[in-house]
Amino acid sequence: MPDTDSLTPGGSRAQVRGVRLSLRAADGPADRTDLFIAPDGSLWGQRTTAGAAEERTGSVDSAVLGRLVSRLRQDAADGHSVAAPGPARLSVNGLLPSGDAMWGEGTDAPPAPAVALLGQVVAQLFGDSQGGGLPGIAVQVDDSQEDPSAAPAAAYGGSAEAGPSSSRTAAAFGQVSGRAAYVLAEEGKGFGLYTVPDQELLGSSPAEASAGALIPETVALGSFEERGLLAAGDRRGALKVWDTTTGAALHATAAAGGAQAVAAGTVRGVPLAFAAGRTGDVHAWRASDARSLGALSTALHGAAALCHARCADLDLLAAAGEDAVVRVWNIADGERLHLLVGHSERVSALAVLSLGNQAVLASGGADHDIRLWDLATGRPLAVLSGHAATVTGLAFVELAGRPVLASCSLDGTVRTWDVREGRALHGWSARCGWLTSLVAVTLNGAPVLATGDEHGSVRFWEPGSGTAAGALAAAPENPFEGVQEAATPVNSLAAADLEGTPVLVAGHGDGTVRVWDLSQGALLRRLDADGGPITSVAVTAGTADGGAANGATAGGGTAGSSEAAGPVLVCGTASGTVRCHRLADGALLSAPGPHTDRVTALSFAPSGVLVSGSADGTVRTWDPLDGTPLLRFAAHPGGVTAVAAGEDGGHALLATAGEDCTVRLWHGLRGIAGPVLTGATAPASALVFGALQGRAVVIAGASDGSVAVWDVATGRSVSVLPGDGPAVRSLVHQELEGESLVAFGDQDGTLRLLHLASGTVLNEVGTGAVPLAVSFDDSGLHVVGAGGLSSF
């Protein structure tokens, strides 16, 4: 918790400047939420539920504080007419013209309008706004998976001093160069590969520490085309794979950090997707199949705005964000061409006007200014001042043969500017609250401006006069479900031409994407939420015939053929999910990027494909050698707890378990849903395929110590070994002398041997450590704990 109280030398208690809100649940006084906003917009929140505290940080735009002050002043003028219901305390220090103020409970309860606004901030901060909160530009949330207070830890590819005993450990059995082996990974110690049972060291991480190295959550050993592989996943959603023979790292995905900005462009005939979060670099992928094409360095500053541009036969990408710097790269070779310095605060909007071999870049942000740059040379051209709040949208149009820049802002106004002369032309109020996005479109053959706002409306404006030219419904009737949709903030807009029809794409705070036919003013399609609120949308034209040329992109990657005919829609979400859809029918082409939450389970399929499950609720499959994403599907909404890969009758199978206490079967590695296996009494923490009396079964060990068995062919429960004890941590099936046996270890360090047909526990033994992995072979039963291998 930040130090929001300080003791003055005279002994009186004085509050530091800022806003502090405390909310307590009426039915659970111990459950509470605390919020603090500093004058510079820095944001901290803590929610305590059933004794467990969750902490989040971020920032709010100055417009949020401005609205809060306005509501408090209005409440004071109205004589404090409406008090907030429920137990709430509010203090405001150093922000109100009338002086500091504090409200308690009862008759002195804080004003309802102020608490309602801060409640929206809380909902946005903790990710439970349900789409009805504030626009994304107003509240920026830091990656909740990062732990800045944690000591630096190394894992795969690095090491550090040993951490506390509670540090993460993970283990797995497998084969290395034809020999039985196991891997043990420990936070702060790296990993080691050893033979079974003699524990000969086959390889380990190097001694030097590696910044940003994986923090172990789960590991797996496998092989592909006779090549031994080690895979590891961490708590930030990152994956890394090594060759177990050479020790070489084959590929890795960066940890997710949100996808607050995306861009799309067709480079040498190949539709590409770009994305960046609040931290980290800009990543590039081939839109059709999510093949990674490299990264463009932002010195880990991330980006709040991205823009693809074409200038003098070069494909360029511009990025800008929290550090107020605009970076421009040549996409073909990854060379940074310009570092444009001039803004004093966060840059949130970019637009490019191409003029043959020249181009003008416009940038705007939290300093309220718009800057124009010569994109060829990086030379500043003009500074345009006039907005009274953060600039949220920029677009170029042509009026009477002259280039004009249009802008919108959280001050609720739209303004136009003469590009050649660098002067203001016109400005008007949209009278609809905060404007969040702007794009130039064509209506009835004429250029118009489209703005999105905090209430979910899209409005059109004649750019020369500012005259209203129509609107799209904030809450349209969904033609596909026959229901009225709720209004939700528009966070991003993009325009495109779809086979001669002008279309507008709107990304909303509830995670949906709506595609509008502007010629009819009708909702063309709606893409469901997947990954939280939409933060950014972009559209690019694919090749007309679906083919593509080859070329180097984003720092040396090679782009191949594309299956994306026509425009490609790229969506970014607050959780970090990036999706590429074919605009013509909404079909998902690819989902580049890593998991957006910790990797909870890994398994190599018999084919060698790597399977991963995550707390983000998805299961993904990957090319084991180059890391190309192959498949992504939503498996368990509350999070995936375990995965297993196997075969039955020559058919590939996947089994997944989740926080919803179900186990699901998936036919093949194409994500085709099979039976949902019910009857488990707790979420499964370990899964394995096995056989019982000649029939394929799936076996699950649960967090309550129970073990359940289902028939793969029918999905029916075969047996359940009740549990009322420590969680099952590891599980293995083995057929021995015609009998099906299961060995499983629990959190208390007990190892049990189960006769599967009868459900009888044949033996149990204490191992002295949590069994992270269990294996059978001809020499006996082997268990890996934090201290290494034990054999029985």
Image (tube, grey):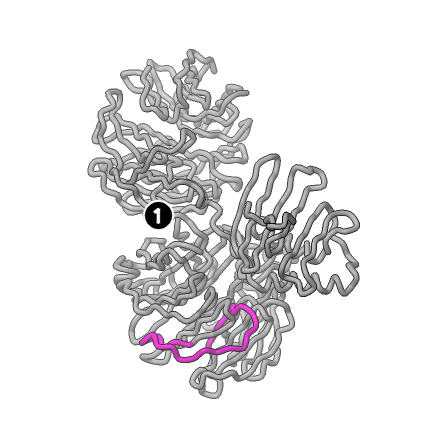
Could you tell me residue 411's position as x and y percent?
59, 70
Total labels: the figure holds 1
Asked if residue 275 lies left or right of residue 82, the reply is left
Vertical placement of 404 versus 58: above or below? Answer: below
330 or 677, which lies in front? 330
Instruction: Give the residue number, with chain letter if any, for mark 1.
Output: 253
Q: Which residues are magenta?
A: 372-396
For label 1, the crowd category at 10 Å Cα-Cα, with few meaning under 14, some 14 to 19 and many 20 or more, is some
Quadrant in which residue 18 is drawn: bottom right
637 or 276, which lies in front? 276
Could you tell me residue 442's position as x and y percent?
51, 76
Q: Is residue 541 visible?
A: no
Residue 177 covered by magenta stretch: no
Residue 383 covered by magenta stretch: yes
Vertical placement of 709 versus 132: above or below? Answer: above
Asked if residue 609 lies left or right of residue 765, the reply is left
Vertical placement of 688 versus 551: above or below? Answer: above
At label 1, the amino acid type is Thr
Could you tell me residue 51's position as x and y percent?
60, 35
